[in-house]
Amino acid sequence: LLFLCELSHIFVLCVPPDLREIVFVIQSQSNTFHVRQAERRREDLLKQARGFTKKQPVVLLLHSLSENEGDWSILPLLPYLSHSFGKNSSWIVFLEEETNVKLIALIKVLAKVDKNKEWFLGKPLFDEESTIIHHYAFAENPSIFKYPDFAASWALSIPLVVRLAKKVKEEPLKSDFTIDLKHEVRYYASHAVLHGFQLFSCNTCRASGLLICDMCAFVFDSCLLFLSKGEPVNKEDIFVAVKTCKKFHSERVPVIKKTWEKDALFLEYYSDHADPSIPTINLGVPNTERGHCGKTFAILQRFLSSAVPDTKWLLIVDDDTLISIPRLQVLLSCYDSSEPVSLGERYGYGLSQGGYSYITGGGGMVFSREAVVRLLKSGCKCYSNDAPDDMVLGMCLNALGLPVTHSPLFHQARPEDYARDFLAHQVPISFHKHWNIDPIAVFNKWLKNDFTASQDELKSGKTEL
């Protein structure tokens, strides 16, 4: 195949790369639903390739590459990719399970780029203000730093993979925490290489066809929008536990009551003080300024007791979490409650040194009944009441060999802490923190609309990436 490529407004013939030189890595997860999604995406890529060549690309599912829990954070995986594909490949292309790729459009883009140089290609995001989830990096001018939108896919040239893999092996990663992977991978690369790689702008993406899927890249959360063929799970299937304390009864609880409480059929507030006007329940665990592990494990035990309705799912949130219960009902219809599901926004701790993943608590932690049963049967417990509950649960799940399932629709921080273009193609489920915002206004803007309205808006084309 030959393509006409526009280089500096001059059209020239471009020779596309041999598809065997492209390695696709689908950023898959080990949950049953996500495995099916990843396999469907792999078959789509191979089917497209068979349509015009016998030279098939390599398509890998990330979750199946090794037993290393940290592979999802990409950097620990680079030495393997460099060793396995450094000699015979030119590009590593990463995509999410829901990323639709037009293969011919992709190879047109790669044909324009010198594969022998170091390239980091993707659709750029940037912060309009410094944010805690990025450790307040580039505080003076946060928009100067561009990082890739994983939903639109991203690619590394093999020379860059080789350099980064060498750096990973020679120098340990500086941060223990993996919070926003797309930002952290780009930040690491920018410090490893001082020249020669860039992120395409969205205008370049439109002009060249980088990972085109309707316009530039048109990506949806496929479960929440299209693949939930059944009905949303019933309200009767979800038990909601809200962690609060006496000092926030008058400040935070009223926000919940004015926003999302009415959408939850079974909900209890757990506090260090029993207040019948709310009402709150005192579980006998004293309040702590941080961690709240003792309270969370008391909630897990109560969930399995006869004191509360027998439901399939447990949602644990903070008293300053804003969440859409109807959207959660739709999302949960994608998962099998008989499996040990732990769902939310995934963070990592010490992943490059054999650490573990965990669901960060502020965005909401969702557990199937089976997951709670296995956690408590294992003897897992807090080492102190003020231990970080989400991290302790992550350690326990890791010890049991149970996966943590990530959804980008849960958010540990406020809407303004995320890039505008990142949120533009989402139907978010949760946000967290009331700091410097009007939480009721945030809920009404981002979470109040019902699922049907949000789906219609996305289908209308207003979420172009």
Image: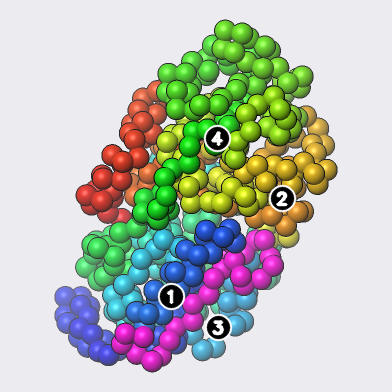
Q: Is residue 144 visible?
A: no
The x and y percentages for residue 8 are 20, 75
Mark 4 or mark 1: whose residue is earlier in sequence:
1
The x and y percentages for residue 335 are 53, 51
Q: Amino acid at mark 1?
A: Glu
**Secondary structure found at label 1:** helix
Side of 431 where 405 appears, left or right = right
- Residue tagged by mark 2? 397
The x and y percentages for residue 279 are 59, 13
**Secondary structure found at label 4:** strand
Mark 1 or mark 3: whose residue is earlier in sequence:
1
State how far apart marks 2 and 1 are (Cα): 31 Å
> What span is colored magenta in the figure?
50-75
Q: Amino acid at mark 4?
A: Ile
Q: Amino acid at mark 3?
A: Phe
Place residue 47 in its image quadrant: bottom left
Q: Amino acid at mark 2?
A: Leu
- Residue tagged by mark 3? 85
State how far apart marks 1 and 3 are (Cα): 21 Å
Nearer the observer: mark 4 or 1; the answer is 4
Residue 412 against residue 86 in the figure, above or below: above
- Residue tagged by mark 1? 43
Mark 4 or mark 2: whose residue is earlier in sequence:
4
Residue 417 against residue 114 in the figure, above or below: above
